Image (cartoon, rainbow, N blue to C red):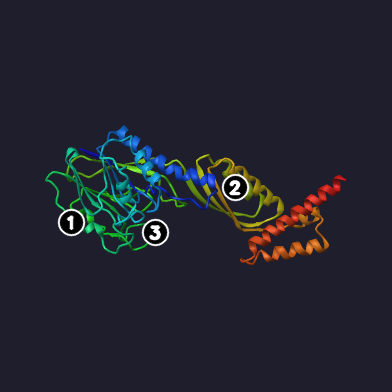
Amino acid sequence: MTHFLHTADWQIGRQYGQFETDDAALLAEARFDVVARIAALAAERRVDAVLVAGDVFDTQGVSDRTIRRLFAAMATYAGPWVMIAGNHDAALADSVWSRAMQLGCIPPNVHVPLRPGVVDLPAINLAVLAAPLTQRHTYDDVTQAFDTLETEAGRVRVGLAHGSVAGRLPDTIDATNPIAPDRVARARLDYLALGDWHGCLSIDARTWYAGTPEQDRFRGNEPGYVLDVRIDAVGAEPVVERVATGKYRWSAWSETVNVPTDAQALAERLAALRADDVLRLEVSGHVNMEIWDALQRAVDQAAAQVRALLPDWSGLRLEPDQADLAELGASGYVGEVAAQLQALQADAAQSAVAGEALRLLLRFQRESATQGAAK
């Protein structure tokens, strides 16, 4: 039996500019941590090899220290690794891979083919047909070379590639780096290990995307896994097990709030979040000052307990009711200004500024009223 782990899209060196500095640093660090977990998993399960299907690095320009840290994170597993370049870290003449070789930090058990070919591992009866990308985008199917690559008789043939299986991915994506949907049959493969799609996805029984092992974007396409693959013999159907590896859970919520019960329901959902949650929250609707304040408190409390929270209030309009205005004493000129700001929220170009100005005005009036009553 041939037994290996299939993983891809580590995106080492990825930056998270939309987050606060501390959160961004921890999300970037999680990508090193998951590589260490994969190495530990490989050692624990005593697999024959680990196959990494491209985009090991997020960019060509990662630092030398980042390159060294990546290979250090792999050290727990001493068996063979086979990793290829993807579109983010294509095997250019001058690339992150050429720098890694110059640094001398690629261990002997790590195979990094820079051109299409066969990595033969006779000790484990495995031939890896590798198709590293040599440029970021190509319109040719680099796996076509697999059809004519010969391997020793009796070897398990596994393809390793990075790209898009034509017509088989759930979303419309770029047509670059295409892969024929029948490549397994054409090339007589026992399994085709793919990268590029960041979710765990089976194209057919022998063709799989492992997805990124640590979620890195707000898309619910089942990221956060590696694949444990067992092939009993040449021609046998692979047994594929999804193994969870991700630490952080990314979610995107789009909520509409108009009445107090809407705000309460959202507050309860937010309160159930954990320290490993990363949330993008879009709130829309029309609320008075009381509901707005309740929402703000709930979001602030959630932000203190999760890894990261990105709120978007642009779709939420503050519409003070008569009780708000009466309580705040917003009559005369102040009332007119409040009404004008409320109307400006309907203008997409001015909505955010007008809404914030209206909130500040009403809070100022509330504080003034409170201070006046205290004298």
Callout 2, which amino acid?
Leu
Closest to the observer, 111 or 335: 111
Q: Is residue 186 visible?
A: no
Vertical side of 244 occupied by 142: above or below:
below
Q: Which mark is residue 147?
A: 1
Q: Nearer the viewer, mark 3 or mark 1?
A: 1
**Disc number at residue 266?**
2
Task: Name the mark nearer the viewer: 1 or 2.
Answer: 1
Horizontal arrangement in the rendering, residue 281 relative to residue 212 (left or right): right
Residue that extends furthest to the left in the rendered view of this protein = 153
| Residue 156, position as x, y percentages in the image | 18, 44
Tell me whether the residue at label 2 lies in contact with that at label 3, contact meaning CB atoms closer than 8 angstroms. Answer: no
For residue 116, side relative to residue 286 (left or right): left
- 76 and 72: which is toward the camera: 72
The Cα atoms of the two marked residues, 2 and 3, are separated by 29 Å
Residue occupied by mark 3: 171
Q: Nearer the viewer, residue 31 or 228?
A: 31
Is the residue 329 above or below the residue 33 in the image? below
Name which of mark 2 and mark 3 comes first in the sequence. 3
